[in-house]
Amino acid sequence: MKHRHGFTLVELLVVIAIIGVLVGLLMPAVQQARESARRMQCTNNLKQLSLATHTYHDTYGSFPPSWDGGGQWSGLARLLPFIEQGPLEAAIDWGTSYTAYQSNGSASNILNVGVPLPAVELDMFKCPSEVNLRSVDVTGDGVPDHFPSNYALSIGTFLVYDGAQSGDGAFGANRFTRIAEFADGTSNTMALSEVNTFTRFHSASVYDNSTGIPALSAVAGEINSNVTSSTAPSGHTQWVSGNVQQTGYTAFFTPNTIFNIDGRLQPADFVNNSEGAGDVDQNPCMAAVTARSFHPGVVNVAFADGSVSKVTETVDLNVYRTVATRFGGEVSLRNKL
């Protein structure tokens, strides 16, 4: 009598269980490898943007302003010709407000590509680990008006613009910074970093420029007291806008700082006033707009010399602020980031 060979039900269940365990053990390694690849791509984006600022400097003798008083365009927009987006830059009239290029503006169809110019998606501005990238319809007509950027220019520690001078960072409002102004050295000064898109922020004229940088607890209290779940998540949603809450960041808080917003730990920012406000000389634009990322425990940062490093979210605040200023005269401890 012939016997049929095969798995018993028990043996089959054991094999399935073993395979399940192995898959469970492998998944973290697979996820880690994927995140490593995403962070490498993010690092490359920052590297290319940093090199673009140097090409801009070679061309015009300075770095671009983070915001300009004409059309209020961003420094990122000024880099377009140097990241192989020359035709996009050619469509821009820098003396015209970027809002004229929205879906309800006079230049809404200037590109004839199906979306207004500010809503064009640029891969160079997108971190592959970001989970919240989408276009924004600010006019409510069903047509995209803006697209975010995951990368922002370093504006300094807190002061952004008071109508006459800008802050102490690599970039500034209405300021064309030259490499010669980096007394701390370009290798010791941050130029760009990652930011999270769709960040809630609170704006209020509560500080002036006479008392220096306020205490962490004061600004944290301002955010915790005023930002709620109903606050519009409109920060870092417009790559064309030069406002600090859109394409800038400061080193007031350490990277990835979050706040208790209606019982949930969430990112949030603070802006004292707009760069273009009529009373900016009495109520300067100051900001606690924080560098953030979806990479576990770190943000990628490009320095003004073109190099890229990671900065941990546990970095000492004083060390972090030393690399946020271009002329602070501090002892740089970049290796402690």
Image (cartoon, helix red, strand yellow):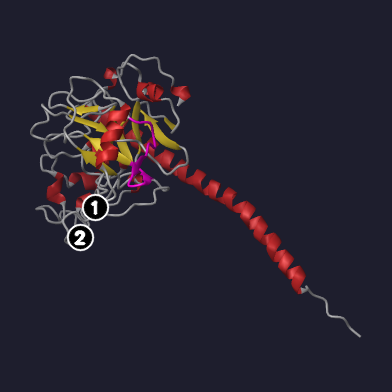
- Does the residue at mark 2 contact the one at mark 1 (Cβ under 8 Å)? yes
Asked if residue 259 can be seen in this view, the reply is yes
Q: What's the residue type where badge 1 is placed?
A: Ala
Residue 192 vertical position relative to residue 107 in the rendered view, above or below: above
**Horizontal and vertical percent position of residue 278:** 8, 34
Q: Is residue 294 left or right of residue 213?
A: right
Mark 2 Cα within 10 Å, few/some/many (few <14, many 20+)?
some
Residue 288 vertical position relative to residue 119 in the rendered view, above or below: above
For the point 73% across and 65% down, the residue is 14
Q: Looking at the image, which is closer to me, 268 or 223?
A: 223
**Horizontal and vertical percent position of residue 116:** 19, 54
Rendering quarter of residue 304:
top left
Magenta stretch contains residue 258: yes
Query: Which segment is the magenta one?
Result: 253-267
Rendering quarter of residue 94:
top left
Mark seen at residue 119: 1
Mark seen at residue 143: 2
Q: Looking at the image, which is closer to me, 301 or 297?
A: 297
Residue 226 vertical position relative to residue 131 in the rendered view, above or below: above
Asked if residue 77 can be seen in this view, the reply is no
For the point 34% across and 37% down, the residue is 49
**Horizontal and vertical percent position of residue 221:** 29, 34
Q: Looking at the image, which is closer to me, 80 or 295?
A: 295
Distance between mark 2 and mark 1 Cα atoms = 9 Å
Q: Is residue 22 left or right of residue 143?
A: right
Q: Secondary structure at mark 1?
A: helix
Dominant secondary structure (helix, strand or loop) of the stretch shown in magenta? loop
Q: Secondary structure at mark 2?
A: loop
For the point 25% across and 32% down, the residue is 287
**Quadrant assignment for the N terminus:** bottom right
